[in-house]
Amino acid sequence: MLRAVIFDFDGVITDTEALHLRAFNQVLAEHSVEITQKQYYDDYLGLTDLDCFKLLIRQGRLGLDCQAIGNLVNEKNRIFEELAKTEAVIIEGVDDFLQMLKQNDVAMAICSGALLPEIELILDQSRLRPFFSVIVSADQIQRGKPHPEGFLLALQKLNDTVISPQACPRPRSGAGIQTPISPSECIIIEDSPWGLQAAKAAGMHNIAVTNSYDADQLQLAERIVTRLDALSLNDLEELCA
């Protein structure tokens, strides 16, 4: 049974990967480092900001101590927020898909490698914040994708909502006591191989959208689509059957 959908954010809800790359490169320019678009999509997309800078250090590209990364993360976040205020857009088809889920009482959450202020800024600007009862961001977890920690935390938080006395949405199984959502009743929507690996490790179903990678790079997915509004409720329920 389908009871919840957990979304990645960048590359699934909003088309901001190019903005993240620009923000990274503005910060890294002071250290004579540049990430090309190909390098970003091959190695860094899907990582948290912290993990991205750590990887650059491990690769020998960034000559800093790991303790100095915090300042880089803060500066990158500041630059990204300035860019997002004027350039972030919601991906076509997302709004209709969210409306369909809401009308059918499917719980919705976000699990992203972005920071919470970045996510909430764009959701508030686009008036999509009310759709999501839970947001798990990079600053709430210790291990980013492909580790399943974020998805498991999002499901835990959804269950805290679902089984509370004021729970919303209501149980879709009919009358009776609300039971916790199981991983098999949850679908993850991702745009990267790292995210799909995390979804599988969490024991959840998954769908990939080809906003960031071609279909042949997303073969871990149970289903691949070019846009979310191509999916019907029956498509989702069949995945969880």
Image: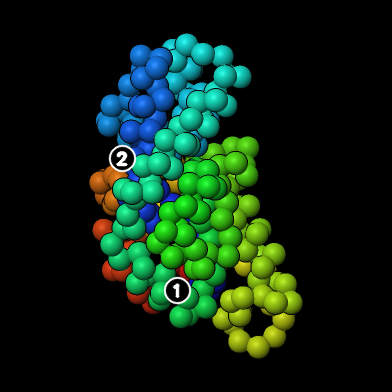
Depicted 25 relative to depicted 198: above or below: above
Residue 6 position within the rendered picture, expressed as x and y whole percent measured from the top left: 50, 59
Q: Position of residue 61 (x, y in %)?
A: 41, 14
Q: Which residue is mark 1?
A: 101
For marks 2 and 1, the one nearer the N-term is 2
Q: Amino acid at mark 1?
A: Leu
* Residue 83 occupies quadrant: top left
Name the residue at 44% across, 21% down: 56
Element at badge 2?
helix
In the image, residue 27 sits, relative to residue 198, either above or below, namely: above
Q: Is residue 97 above or below residue 197?
A: below
Q: Residue furthest bottom?
A: 175
Residue 21 locus on image (x, y percent): 34, 34
Place residue 135 in its image quadrant: bottom right
Q: Helix or strand or loop: what does disc 1 sit on? A: helix
Q: How far apart are the alpha carbons under marks 2 and 1?
A: 28 Å
Question: What colour scheme governs how the chains and residues are painted in the rendered image of this protein?
Answer: rainbow
> For residue 18, which numbered disc appears in the image?
2
Q: Which mark is residue 169?
A: none
Of 32 and 56, which appears nearest the observer? 32
Evaluate whether residue 39 shows in this view: yes
Give neighbour class at mark 1: few <14, some 14-19, many 20+ (Cα, 10 Å). Answer: some
